[in-house]
Amino acid sequence: MVTPEKTCQVPMRANKGCGRQLHDGRHCIFHSERADKDKILFQQELNKLAGQCRGHLLDLNGFIFPDGVTIDAIGPAKIHFYNSIFQGKFVFTHPKIDSDLIFGNAVFKQGAEFEHRIFKHYIFGGKVHFAGAEFLGEAWFRGAVFKADTFLNAKFKKQAVFSAATFEKEVNFSEAKFEKPAGFFEVKFTSESRCRFERTTFGASADFRSCRFEGETFFCDSFSQGKTNEKIDLSGSQISGSFKISEEKNPKTIIRREIDFRNVKFLDPRTVKFEKINLGKFRFSGTDVRLIEFVDVEWDRKKRRNRIRDEVAPDPLTQKFEYDLIAQVYRRLRANYEESRNYPEAGDFYIGEMEMRRRIEKSFFNKKALTLYRWLSNYGESWICPIVWSIVTIFAFTFGYLFAGLSPITLNLDESPRNFIRYAPDLSSWESLISTAPKISDLGRSFLHSCSVFLRFAIRTPRYVVVNEGGYILSVIESVLGPVLIALLFLALRRRFKR
Ligand SMILES: [Zn+2]
């Protein structure tokens, strides 16, 4: 027969059993799972335990804290809360805790409120370790000061608020899961901080507005996580340290949610890097992107050019498109890509810039001129457009001359005008149209004439002349169109291959 254990066997630090006197027949007062356990007794025993511990480790592993218990511990160098369960809101009595706090795999059933009622915020002077911790209620860390912390793999079931907090050293939110909004408004990551958000899941919105990223910051595979359309907002932030956003695992994934990167200020833009990510959902208005580094990134492409989110969807607040700001972003992106000698993409952004200019153009004449410029050569960026238009022009005028009439130039006045060309198509029926269709040879001659007018600036000795006013007007128009289209062709070729 096995005799029941006389002491509590819950493993504590170094896997040693708790060894305390039993309270409910199985566990001690600290480890008892009973909901109605004596709270006052728990508090007295806890105070005694904390009071005995000076300068050492306070081992509270696996404790089940009833609601309302406070922890008054300023002495120990380390406090362990591994696997502890907090049934109520968690409260420290002192606003500044210098001990290292280890909350690995702890469960906060009502959430945690690391906000002091009197002193407003906590200062964590030691390391804070929340790896694997679970916050079933709201987690409030507003204004807290962290020296070094990890929230690796922590789970926030309700909203988590870190607003106005300061992170001074290591900050690790990798693989953390925020199921509800994550608030990092006005958080400061100091120059010594090393902040990582790798494979972090933002299940709802994430608010990083007006943050100051002064240290090393890395967002990796975090923006495409979470099946939500709620945005990640970094607008108004200030970045002065090294900063990288990357989707290494799925660089081609089109991110579902909007990423607001508007009005972000860089103190040293050359340390900012976007790598292996589709930037189609990024807003960039008001952010100077000229010197930041884009490596292997994709954009939202439509009508053979790259677009930023600001152009695709209006400002969520004003429901308006700020075309002048969008044009500015495209101009800066063009400068950025030209700097890295990526001329085709720089050209893409130039088209975007001109397109925005056309949309905001107030003058009717300028607007039409820009529209024509776009039609003829996609703002001087397309060399295919002028070629197509040249072919269309030469063929259209070929038929024009056929019907207006052409006569070969001859110095022999006695020669009969057998090569005189003029057709009048009879459109009354198919048969009559076919019988009045031009001969191939005449078509060829008219085509040659059209070419010579198109290139009149180069070919000065025509073989044919027009015979009436109509033909003359056609010649004038074609001889103007020719040089314009050829100039546009050369401009586009020059832009593409040599800048
Ligand atoms: Zn125990």
Image (cartoon, helix red, strand yellow):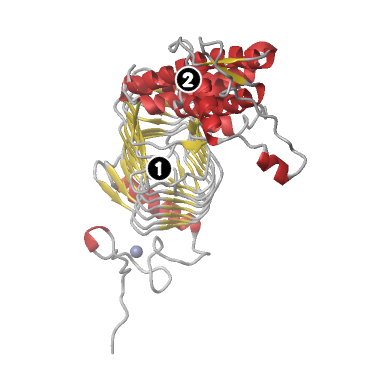
Q: Look at the image and tell me whether residue 24 can be seen.
A: yes
Under mark 2, the amino acid is: Gly
Mark 2 lies on a secondary structure that is loop
Residue lying farthest to the front in this orientation: 414
Q: Hey, which residue is sitting farthest right in the picture?
A: 428
Residue closest to the eye, 223 or 16? 223
Element under disc 1: loop
Confirm if mark 1 falls within 8 A of ligand 1: no
Residue type of the residue flagged with mark 1: Asp
State whether residue 38 is above or below residue 361.
below
Q: Position of residue 368 (x, y in %)?
A: 65, 17
* Mark closer to the observer (1, 2): 2
Which quadrant is home to the N terminus?
A: bottom left
Residue at 56 percent across and 19 percent down: it is 373
Q: Residues within 10 Å of mark 2 (few under 14, many from 20)?
A: many
Tell me, yes or no, if residue 361 can be seen here: no
The residues tagged by marks 1 and 2 sit, at their Cα atoms, a distance apart of: 73 Å
How many discs appear? 2
Which residue carries the number 1 mark?
72
Q: Is residue 239 depicted above or below 257 in this figure? A: above
**Residue drawn at 49 percent across, 63 percent down:** 37
Q: Residues within 10 Å of mark 1 (few under 14, many from 20)?
A: some
Residue 380's mark? 2
Q: Residue at x 59, y 17 (%)?
A: 370
Marked residue nearer the N-terminal end (1 or 2): 1
Between 204 and 341, the residue placed more toward the observer is 341
Quarter the C terminus occupies: top left
Q: Nearer the viewer, residue 277 or 68?
A: 277
Mark 2 close to ligand 1, CB under 8 Å: no
Residue 21 appears at what percent x and percent y?
34, 67
Q: As drawn, which residue projects farthest toward the bottom? A: 1
Provide residue 208's location: percent of width, then percent of height.
48, 33
